[in-house]
Image (cartoon, rainbow, N blue to C red):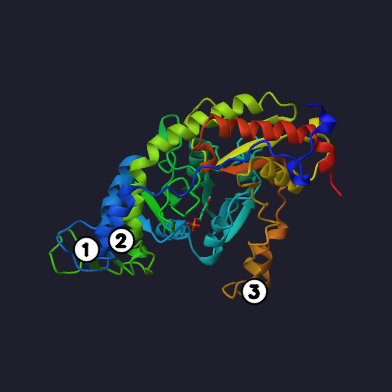
Amino acid sequence: MSRSSQNLALHGGPAVYSGAWPNWPCVTDSTIARLADVARSGRWAISGAYTGQEPYERQFSRAFADFIGVPHAVPTANGTSALTISLEALGVGHGAEVLVPGLTWIACASAAAALGAIPILVDIDLNTLAMSLQAAEAAISSRTAAIMLVHPYCMVADAPAFRALADCHGLVLIEDGSQAHGAEWSDRKVGTFGSAGAFSLQQVKLLTCGEGGVAVTADEAVYDRMQQLRADGRRYRAVSVPGELELEEVGSIQGRNFCLSEFQAAVALAQLERFHEQQALRRRNASLIAEMVDEIPGCSVPQAQPVVTARSFYQFLVRLDPEVLGPYDPVKVVAAIGAETGVFCEMIDAPLNANCLYTPLRSPRTPASAELRAMLDPKRFNLPAAYIAHRTHVAFGHWALLGTQAHCEAIAKAFRKVTQNIDRLRPG
Ligand SMILES: *Cc1c(COP(=O)(O)O)cnc(C)c1O
């Protein structure tokens, strides 16, 4: 087909692929069976009486801790509350500065701000798309208390380097693995390098129960505080007695209710059974697509450093090179790729200094103090690399990697066709 005869699907031409895509989330027989088991059990919440059967919440917490390779896991209502109890359990509160990557989901910054802490938006490294180590070091002040390190999209941040930086300055390191369940740096899973790790189990995440989260830690005292923080100051008793509440009242720290229900825990446990098989398929398909896409001028798939022993593809990314393609409108490019493939794709996150959902100054929690308001203002941060990354990556949901060779080819064909017709997707 000659270049000029290719009409983009976005402009009414034939799409490169028009079949179906894999479904997400994946319902399994075990998911349904466990949900029914909870429904009949007489125990829908961990704050209910012990029935003689171990609650799903505890079963899931053990299974998840084993999977990550960490002694303790505390399930929570969502990833945001996992971050919240991690920060609080580590003593991060009012007035403390928390380094947060300038390019990630808003919950990282909004969770810290909700505790009265001051998110410091740190620019990213364009190779890893994670927080830049140099920019992080430069952002440390006498008020800095914590580094929140996110393993973003399909990349793994250099957690040992951030751990060393945190240790050197007496800061706590919290890893956010919400986009990287099961990813490894040098044979060690993300979430185990920090004093605490937080994961989301929200519907679009790699492991999901609709809404849910988990906080993990190796530290016994942090674990005790995390338990209380998520259950109104209560924690599991040492011995469970049928007919009695399984939680005991402690109150050594002010908790709130961030509990995961039994229904969600049952779904999470069932989904974990399928996780390894799904990861293997995603990894295989990701390398298939990368081989094809890397041949296309102006397109590439971000590589992981060799020290990354296992990748998790929360979002599969294709990087566009404006030097090769010339100026393009990224909104139009994403729409064109979506129209060719019929699968959901998007630009990666908007930088947090320009994200319409990160609005700490519009929160009634934010004090009137002009000094604090100035510190919280996202606009005061400069995030040039985050801005570039936002405009040069097309992101696919991980279920696009759960298909066949034909699905992989569809993605590659779409990039070939769209980049050959990039003249029709110029800005303006
Ligand atoms: C999804 C996500 C969260 C928030 O999780 P919720 O379950 O939506 O509260 C936090 N951090 C990152 C990096 C995420 O991707």
Amino acid at pointer 1: Ser
Residue 34 horizontal/vertical position (percent): 28, 54
Relative vertical location of residue 111 with respect to residue 334 in this rendering, above or below: below
For disc 3, does the CB lie below 8 Å from ligand 1? no
Dot 1, how many residues are within 10 Å of its Cα: few (below 14), some (14-19), or many (20+)? Answer: few
Asked if the residue at tag 2 contacts the one at tag 1, i.e. Cβ–Cβ closer than 8 Å, the answer is yes
Q: Which residue is mark 2?
A: 262
Sequence-earlier tag: 1 or 2: 1
Query: Label 2, label 3: how many angstroms apart (C-alpha)?
Result: 42 Å
Mark 1 or mark 2, whichever is nearer to me? 1
> What secondary structure is marked by label 3?
loop
Residue 189 horizontal/vertical position (percent): 41, 37
Query: Label 1, label 2: how many angstroms apart (C-alpha)?
Result: 10 Å
> What secondary structure is marked by label 2?
helix
Residue 33 horizontal/vertical position (percent): 28, 53
Sequence-earlier tag: 3 or 1: 1
